[in-house]
Amino acid sequence: MQTNRRPETQSENQFQLPAWPGRNRFVVPAVAAVILIAAIGGCIAVFSGNKGTNIEATVVATPPVLTVNIERAIVRPVNQQIRVTGSVWARDPLVIACEANGLQIQQVLVDEGHQVKKGQPLAILNGSILRAELEREKALLASSEASLQKSYQPNRREDINGLRAAVAQARANAAQQHAVRVQAEANLANARNNAKRYSDLLVQGAVSAQEAESKDTTERVAQAELKNSDEKIRAADFILKQAEERLSMAVSGGRLEDVQIARAEVNKSRANVHRLEALLAQTVVRAPSDGLITRRDAHIGDSSTSGKSLFTMIRDNQIEMRAQVPEKDLSVLHAGLPVIISSASLGSKTITGRIREIGSHVDPDTRLCTVKIDVDFKSGLKPGMFAEGRVNLENFTALTVSSSAVISRDDKYFVFVFEKLPQSPAATPQASSASAVKPMTNGIARLHYVLPGARTGNYTEIREGLKDGDEVVTSGAGFIKDGDTVSVGQ
């Protein structure tokens, strides 16, 4: 028959009944004995001449092996649910390791179960050696910085002043030599005039030749003095130029190469200081985030090892339930759906979580996918606890039977459908009998394989294997087999 229902999904809440135990070892022989006696009685009746008895009458005469209860399979509203199970985990567990190597743990400031804030000290390591090395590197840095400053201006102030005085002296000397040359030029001009005049007078016979030669000699001496004065001027100018260059170099500072070398030494020392400061900071192990300390592996006196875990914490107190969901249920799940969660630690109390993430892959062996459900940290659930979840989906109508009628064996599900047999006239009680017992209805139990679906209350959806109105065995189904004769009380 057709029912108004949602597309089929396979869920963990699909009815899962454990296999019923086998028949009781005392009941089976007794039942077998009853069947054997009934068979012998039937044979005697046949050979005694009751030729009118048909096969159906023979079946009716077979005693029932068990008295059972039955109910009809009917269509009813079903509240579709998906049941999931899983464990509670930290959403983002943080393992806090030690970065420093070979340092002794001096103090442990927190323990398991402590709430911590970001940056809060958790443990302190021995950093005395690092502090001594840091002081040494700071002293070297100061020395390098002083050398750099000296490379900018290697000359002292008094040296520069001396160079300035030397320039002034050289400039005065050069000026003096220029003045001497002017005098020498004047002397040469005067001597040249005298020599010419005496030469003219010598022609006239006014002066002697000796006096004329004396004036010529004086002219030549004046020329030599002027030439000598020019040489002294060039020397004085050269000395002045050298003095001015020395002063300029002293004032401008050190050479570029010296400055670059000094600056490199400063950078080297500064880098060593920063390295030691970083190592010293690692001697204080701090919380990288707010959260709860769930494990402590640090102990006073232990030697630290780089990368070794000291603490484990839950970042920002965020926990989640990681549920395993069959692949066929993934189509109806999405982020944001509420999940009703229960756990043994909560007793009868339930909490509500929400699906945050559906896994990106399905395990090829189990066909299960991990679904992450956000859980309130204050709910009472702790990492490692087992929990069960229930996702309520849309209601629909479907064919249902009592959950006790569905039997699971070897990953197969089946029910027993009751087929009523006609009553024998001899079995009809006399109406006049005041103490008559109500008659029993006999029938055949037929095994039907079914495909169960959602379960709601005490009823289970049957997707395949039954039709509306079928009568199924609800009690005692685990003690009968296909084709057994059973009895139902009126």
Image (tube, rainbow, N blue to C red):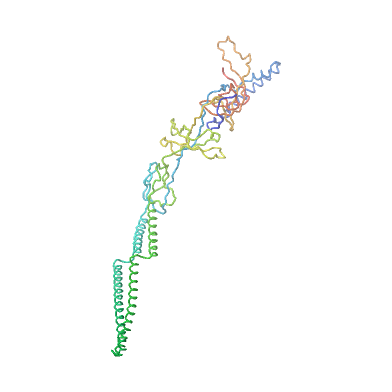
Q: Is residue 484 above or below residue 286?
A: above
Q: In the depicted view, which residue is nearer to us: 340 or 5?
A: 5
Please identify the quarter of the rendering in which residue 397 is found.
top right
The quarter of the picture where the N terminus appears is top right
242 horizontally vs 454: left or right: left
Where does the image place residue 25, in percent across and percent down from the top left?
58, 28
Please identify the quarter of the rendering in which residue 318 is found.
top left
Where does the image place residue 408, in percent across and percent down from the top left?
57, 30
Q: In the depicted view, which residue is nearer to us: 487 or 350?
A: 350
Q: Hey, which residue is sitting farthest top in the picture?
A: 432
Q: Is residue 104 above or below residue 205?
A: above
**How many numbered badges does the structure rendering display?**
0
Q: Hey, which residue is sitting farthest front in the picture?
A: 204
Where does the image place residue 477, in percent across and percent down from the top left?
57, 25
215 horizontally vs 399: left or right: left
Q: In the depicted view, which residue is nearer to us: 96 or 34?
A: 96
Q: In the depicted view, which residue is nearer to us: 292 or 226?
A: 226
The quarter of the picture where the C terminus appears is top right
Where does the image place residue 392, in percent across and percent down from the top left?
49, 30
